Image: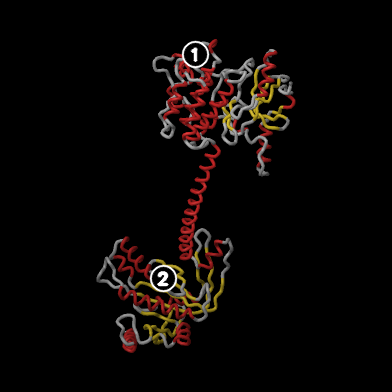
Amino acid sequence: MNEWKLSYNRITVPTKEMEKKSQSHRSLQSGPSTFTSISAFDGEDSIFKVALLDNDPILITRHPPTLLSDSCHNDCVKLRKLDHDNVNKFLGLSFDGMDYVVVWRLCSRGSLLAMLSKSVISTDSFFVQCIIRDVAEGLNYIHHSFIGYHGRLTSACCLLTDTFQVKICDYGMSELTRISEMKFKLWSAPEELNSPTSSNTKAGDVFSFAIIAAETISRRPAWQIYGESMNVEDIVARIKKGGAIPLRPHLQHDISDVPPELVALVRNCWRENSLNRPSMDFICEQMKELMNSGGHTNLMDHVFAILEDHTTSLEQEVEDRSKELMEEKKKADILLSRMLPRQVAERLKLGQSVEPEGFDSVTVFFSDVVKFTILASKCSPFQVVNLLNELYGSFDAIIEEHHVYKVESIGDGYLCVSGLPLRNGHEHIKEIVEMSVRFMEYVESFKIASLPREKIQLRIGVNSGPCVAGVVGLSMPRYCLFGDTVNTASRMESNGKPGKIHLTESSFKLLEEHYGDSYDTESRGDVIIKGKGVMETFWVHGRRDRDWDTGMHSSVIRERSRVSDKHESTG
C-alpha cells in the first residue's frame, strides 16, 4: 500500500562532476551510460530532471513542502496503479527531504517540446498523426480515470520513449504547489486564463491538446511564428481577450502533406466556447479513422518501412559514390603518375620513403625548340601556351607508347630517360632513339596556328651511361636525375643542330651493338664540348633507308650532312 512512499536517501541527483565522469566512462565502453538521457532534459523549457532511484534512471519534479491530505495519500496509491501505453508511469513521492519530489519513469528522448524546438528529426505526415494520436489516447485515458482531467497539459509534459511513443506525464497530484511560469500558460484555454475557478476541466485539456497538435503539424513550437513581434505576455493577453477572431497558432505553413480532416479537427478543438469543443472520445475516434485510411497504424512499422527504403537508397548512393570515388582515385593516380614514376608514387602513397637509387646503364634525352625565343616574341602569351600545350601534348602521347619516363619540361626544354626506375637491359637506347625519330617525324608536319609560315625544328641530344635518381622535396616532390650522364646529354643537345639527333659515343656503340641494322647513323667527327674537351659524336638520320623528312634515301641525307659539317669546319 505504501510503495509510493520513497525515501529521499534512495534518490541521487547527478552533479556536473558525476556527468563528466559518466561521459568519460561512456567514451571507454560501448554500452549506454546511466546519464545518457540527461541532455534530453537540459533545456530551459524542461520541467523534469534526470536522477537515480537505487541506481535506476528516473525523472523527478520538485515542489515546495505542503500538508498533504488523506485524500492525496489515497490518490498516490491509485496513481501507482494507472497503466496505459500513452501515460507515463508514476513511481512515487518523496516528502522526507527539503523539497517534495515526485518520481516518474524515464523517457529517454525527452519532451515533444524539446524535439520540436531543436528540429532533431525529420517527420512525415504519418509520424505527425502518430504523435497526435498518442497524445489523444493518453489524455482520453486520463479523462476516464479517477483523475478526470490533466489540468496543465503542455508539450513539455508529453515525453517520448526511444521508439518515439508519446507518454503524458505530470498528471494528478493537484495538492502539490507548482511554480506557474507565464510561458506555460500558452497552452491554457481562454476560460482558464480569465477565471481560475473554471480551470481544470476536460474542455480545457482539449484546448491544450489542440495547441500541441498544431505544434506537431507545423513541426515547431506553436507560437513561434509570431517571433519577436509579440512576447509571451502579449500572446497570453490576446488569448484571454478572445473576440470574433481570437488569436490562434498558424496552420498554413508546411502542412501540405497533412490530411485536411486533421487540420479541421484541431481547429474545432481550440474553439473559443468550451461547450463547442469535441470530447476526447470523439477525437480518438476521428484519429483512428484517419490512421486506418492511411494503411499503417503502427509508428515503428512505418519507421522500419522508411528505414528500409532509406537503406536501399543509401546503398545505391554508397555504390554511386564509391564509383565516383574510384573514378577520382584513377584521375589522381593518373595525375600522380605524370608527376612521378608509378613505382615511386605507389611507395609514397603507402607512406614509405624513397631512397636514392643508382642505375648502371640508362639513356638520357634532352630536346629544345630551335629559336623558340624568336617564335615566342611573335606570339601573345596565350598563343605561346597553346603552342606548347599542343606540341608537348602530342609528345606525351608518343612517350606513352615507349618505355620512357618524362622527367620534366621547362619552357621549350624536354628531359626524358629510359632504363629507370624499371631497368630494361639495353632496350633503353632503342626506346629513346625510336622516340626521338617519332618526335622529328611529328614536327615536320606540325603547323603553328598563329604563325602558319613558320616551322618547328627540334635539337635533340642523347647520352647513355650510369646515373642516380631520387625524389627531392616534400610539398611538391620531384623525381630528379643526377650524374655526369645527364650533364653530357644536355651538352649533346646544346651542341647539336636543328633537325638533328645528336648521340655520344657511348650511346652510338650501344645502338650499333644491339640495333645497328635498324637505324641509319653517321659519325659527326670530333667536336669540342664545353667541360668535356674533344669528343667524337654521332648523328641518327632515321630508321634504316628512311628519313623522317621526305623519305629520301639515307645516303643522300648523309652526303648533305657531311657537306654541311665540312662547310662549318672551313667557316
How far apart are the alpha carbons under marks 2 and 1? 92 Å
Give the residue at x 62% y 18%. Answer: 146
| Residue at (64, 15) in percent of width and height | 175
Q: Nearer the viewer, residue 194 or 83?
A: 83
Q: Which amino acid does label 2 sit on?
A: Tyr
Q: Residue furthest left?
A: 453
Residue at label 1? 191
Q: Tell me the element at label 2.
A: strand
- How many residues crowd around disc 2 within 10 Å: few (fewer than 14), some, or many (20 or more)? some
Which quarter of the figure has residue 72?
A: top right
Q: What percent of the width, then of the height, locates residue 394?
A: 37, 70
Q: What residue type is labelled 1?
A: Glu
At 60% from the left and 36% from the top, the residue drawn is 162
The percent coordinates of residue 69 (x first, y second) are 69, 12
Q: Which mark is residue 214?
A: none
Direction from residue 199 to residue 524 in the image, left or right: left
| Quadrant in which residue 151 is drawn | top right
Q: In this view, does 191 lie above or below 563?
A: above
Q: In this orientation, does residue 22 appear?
A: yes
Graded by Cα atoms within 10 Å as few (under 14), some (14 to 19) or many (20 or more), the crowding at tag 1 reads: many
Q: In this view, does 41 lie above or below 359?
A: above
Q: In this view, does 475 lie above or below 58?
A: below
Which residue is denoted by mark 2 in the rendering? 414
What percent of the width, then of the height, locates residue 484? 50, 76
Quarter of the figure with the C terminus: bottom left
Locate the N terminus and report the quarter of the image it occupies: top right
Coloration of the structure image: secondary structure
Of 142 and 255, the residue lying toward us: 142
Image quadrant where residue 451 sits = bottom left
Q: Of tags 2 and 1, which is closer to the observer?
A: 1
Against 382, residue 418 (above or below) is below
Q: Earlier in the sequence, mark 2 or mark 1?
A: 1
